[in-house]
Image (cartoon, rainbow, N blue to C red):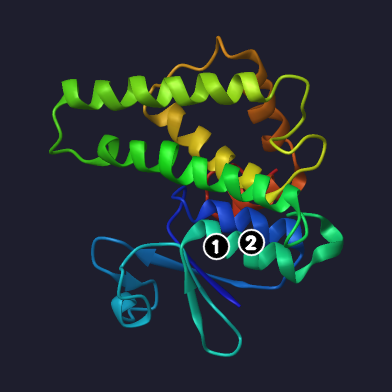
Amino acid sequence: MKLYYSPGACSLSPHIALKEAGIPFDLVKVDLKAKKTEDGNDYLGLNPKGQIPAVGMDNGDVLTEGAVIVQMIADKVPGKNLVPAAGTTERYRAQEWLNFVSTELHKNFSPLFNPAIPDDVKLFFKDRITGKFTYINSALAGKDYLMGSQFTVADGYLFTILRWADGQKIEISGLENLVAYKARVAARPMVQEALKAEGLMKAS
């Protein structure tokens, strides 16, 4: 299996999932501006969407869309409990979180990375994101993770987005549950391995 990624981008979420799952994989860095892989290959030939993440499967298939990729990874190792079993209410709850992070957080961050968008417009999106974080802070009351005591792939996705908040100077210090949650996920050994592999954390 190959994970096509860009350091610190949304591909960090499936990177964390693969580490937590213990599935062997190769990392392939993508230059998103040039649409080239680090070995010079045309990325658009592999993924016409031109976005990351993408996963090259051992059978030659390519899977895209992060929220789908992480569920595929989790389903390969059911004993790890990285996602509830298919068809259960808990699975739909996990998908509910994945969808929320994707549509309400991830997409609201996209304008913040666009230098052509004016600062006042960016402020509007930052306010929207803060409102979503406030909701999650409330939902985390009494919980270690989004689904309760069990870490799931939805947590890897949310953690990835929370890292973006730092770079965009979106303040979450007043959201105590969310701050504690972020630190809890960051302390996981496999999360730290993924961060180190992408050059986002100094190797000890």
From the viewer's perspective, tell me whether residue 200 is left or right of residue 19.
left
Residue 68: which numbered mark, if any?
Answer: 1
Q: Residue at x 81, y 55 (%)?
A: 81
> Is residue 203 at least partly visible in the picture?
no
Of residues 128 and 189, which is closer to you in this image? 128
User: Would you place residue 69 above or below residue 113 in this image?
Assistant: below
Q: Helix, strand or loop at disc 1?
A: helix
Residue 105 coordinates in the image, percent (x, y):
43, 37
Residue 103 coordinates in the image, percent (x, y):
42, 43
Q: Which residue type carries mark 2?
A: Gln
Total labels: the figure holds 2
Of residues 117 and 105, which is closer to you in this image? 105
Residue 177: quarter of image: top right
Contact between marks 2 and 1 (CB within 8 A): the answer is yes
Q: Residues within 10 Å of mark 2 (few under 14, many from 20)?
A: many
Please identify the quadrant where the N terminus is shown. Answer: bottom right
Q: Which residue type carries mark 1?
A: Val
Please identify the quadrant where the C terminus is shown. Answer: top right
Task: Return the residue at label 2.
Answer: 71
Residue 52: quarter of image: bottom left
> Is residue 102 at least partly visible in the picture?
yes
Q: In the orientation shown, which residue stands out farthest toward the top?
A: 174
